[in-house]
Image: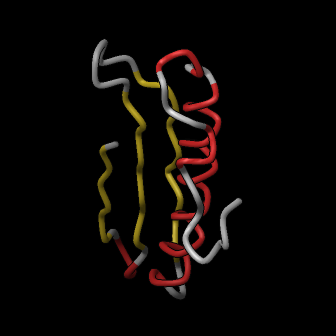
Amino acid sequence: MTGSYYRGDQGVVEFHVEIIDANSGEVLRAIGPVESRESPERVADELSLAVAGAVDTAVALFPSQGTPKAAVTPRGSRGP
């Protein structure tokens, strides 16, 4: 996973996230740009849930590689 954030004009923070296959370099999922005008911390927390969901669907694409789908649990979740 890779990502970046920028503080633009008028204090707007913009987040970008990419989930990349480490073997091929292929971008599996891209999230963003997501902008925060009021609370960058709140948007970052919401973005972390979106990233967890994106990782979960990306992991589900490769079930034969030995990574159980339940291995990715969103922060704050109780898991399986």
Q: Position of residue 77 (x, y in %)?
A: 65, 72
Residue at 30%, 64% (x, y): give it.
6
Q: Tell me which corner region of the image, top left, top right, bottom left or bottom right, holds residue 38.
A: bottom right
Query: Which residue is rendered at x = 46% and y = 84% of the image?
Result: 41
Q: Report whether 13 appears left or right of 30.
A: left
Corner quadrant of residue 22: top left
Q: Residue at x 55, y 83 (%)?
A: 42
Above/below status of 22 relative to 32: above
In this rendering, the answer to whether 31 lies above or below 48 is above
Q: Position of residue 55 (x, y in %)?
A: 54, 42
- The quadrant of the rendering that contains the N terminus is top left
Identify the residue at horizontal 62%, vertical 47% (top origin): 70
> Which quarter shows the C terminus?
bottom right
* In this view, 36 is above or below 71: below
* Snapshot colouring: secondary structure
Residue 52 vs 36, above or below: the answer is above
